[in-house]
Amino acid sequence: MNHTRNWAFFLLLGTGICFLGSCKPETNGDIGDPFDKVQGMVGTWELSSFTQQDLNSPVKEVRDLSAFFIDGIVTPIQLTFGEDRSYGVAIETGKNYFGPGGTWGFDDDLYPTFLQLYTATDTLSYNLGGMVREFDQTMRIEYRRECEATETNIYTFEFNRING
């Protein structure tokens, strides 16, 4: 009798799973072509905020340090990314975390995780806070500072597109 109950239970369970699986709505339409990630970066971007998180602090607060770059008088940092993969930096105040200019790229053009800036003497790498599409007006990148192969700080730069 016990085997019959187990068999009936599994039969009922299997029928229920099949029934629920058959109730899925059908997907209609096409999601379209993927966005061109390179074209999404092209243009001039102006810093709108700058934050720091100290990963060694027991209090995982994020500090807004935008005032080091944005004072309401001079133009904040501007990054310009060209279609030819060149980039330039315009800075009047604050520390330059982006080098003097050079060329730029991604770790993978189809599925980028990192923005890479190549100067004459260095390669700088930044985590992308999200992929930028051609019509997006904001960009977020992170510079992860390390000491002896251990991340100590995360600097987050948020930019607004000022032309495209």
Image (cartoon, grey):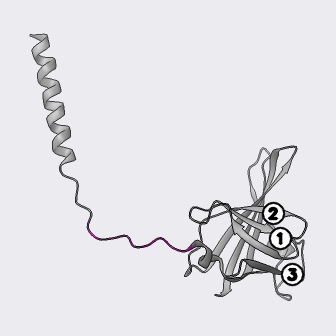
Does 164 sit above or below residue 106? below
* Image quadrant where one finds the C terminus: bottom right
The x and y percentages for residue 156 are 74, 64
Please give left or right for residue 16 compared with residue 106 in the image.
left
In the image, what residue occupies the spot 22% across and 54% down? 24
Q: CA distance from mark 2 to mark 3?
A: 17 Å
The chief SS type of the magenta part is loop
The x and y percentages for residue 85 are 72, 77
Residue underneath mark 1 = 98
Report helix, strand or loop for mark 3. loop
The x and y percentages for residue 128 are 66, 63
The x and y percentages for residue 129 are 64, 63
Q: Amino acid at mark 1?
A: Phe
Are discs 2 and 1 less than 8 Å apart at CB? yes
Are discs 2 and 3 less than 8 Å apart at CB? no
Quarter assignment of residue 163:
bottom right
Residue underneath mark 3 = 91
Please give left or right for residue 32 compared with residue 127 in the image.
left
The magenta stretch is 28-36
User: Can you tell which mark lies on residue 124?
Assistant: 2
Q: Nearer the viewer, mark 2 or mark 1?
A: 2
